[in-house]
Amino acid sequence: MSDVTFLEEGNEDYVKNPHFSSTQEMVHEKLINMEKKELLFQRVFKNLKLFQSLPYPFEKHHALHLKCMTMYSISEKELDAL
């Protein structure tokens, strides 16, 4: 995960637009740094694939499982009313 932190911290979120001109209205001065976003996506996706390939040998805790299965849940409609 530290490599993701270095990618995030070591690269700008925005880069200067080479086509920027103050005389054009719809041309922005800065653009999203897509190279950074792609590198982050690749690294995170690689980590996800790695972690999904590892088995997690959790033992079932019957009392906890029963509690989770019988918990009261709130519907989306009820949540919207809050």
Image (cartoon, rainbow, N blue to C red):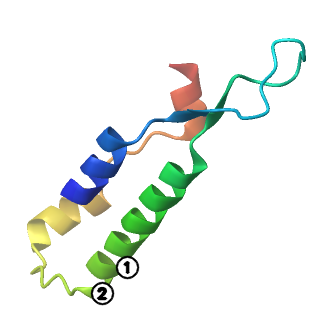
The N terminus appears in which quarter of the rendering? bottom left
State the image coordinates of residue 82 (x, y, percent, origin top left): 50, 19
- When asked about the image quadrant of residue 52, the answer is bottom left
Query: In the image, 41: left or right of 53?
Result: right
At a point 53% along the width and 59% down the height, the residue shown is 38
Cβ–Cβ below 8 Å for labels 2 and 1?
A: yes
Q: Judge whether residue 1 can be spotted in this image.
A: no
At a point 40% along the width and 42% down the height, the residue shown is 11
At a point 79% along the width and 33% down the height, the residue shown is 19
How far is the residue under mark 2 from the one under mark 1?
6 Å
Q: Judge whether residue 24 can be spotted in this image.
A: yes
- Residue 53 vs 78, above or below: the answer is below
At a point 20% along the width and 87% down the height, the residue shown is 55
- When asked about the image quadrant of residue 26, the answer is top right
> Where residue 76 is drawn, which disc sits there?
none
Q: Amino acid at mark 2?
A: Ser
State the image coordinates of residue 63 (x, y, percent, origin top left): 10, 66
**Label 2 neighbour load within 10 Å: few <14, some 14-19, many 20+:** few
State the image coordinates of residue 39 (x, y, percent, origin top left): 46, 60
- When asked about the image quadrant of residue 74, the answer is top left
Q: Secondary structure at mark 1?
A: helix
Q: Secondary structure at mark 2?
A: helix
Count numbered badges in the picture: 2
Q: Amino acid at mark 1?
A: Lys
Instruction: Give the labeled residue for mark 1.
Output: 49
Instruction: Give the labeled residue for mark 2.
Output: 53
**Label 1 neighbour load within 10 Å: few <14, some 14-19, many 20+:** few
Query: In the image, 28: left or right of 8?
Result: right
Relative depth, front residue between 26 and 4? 26
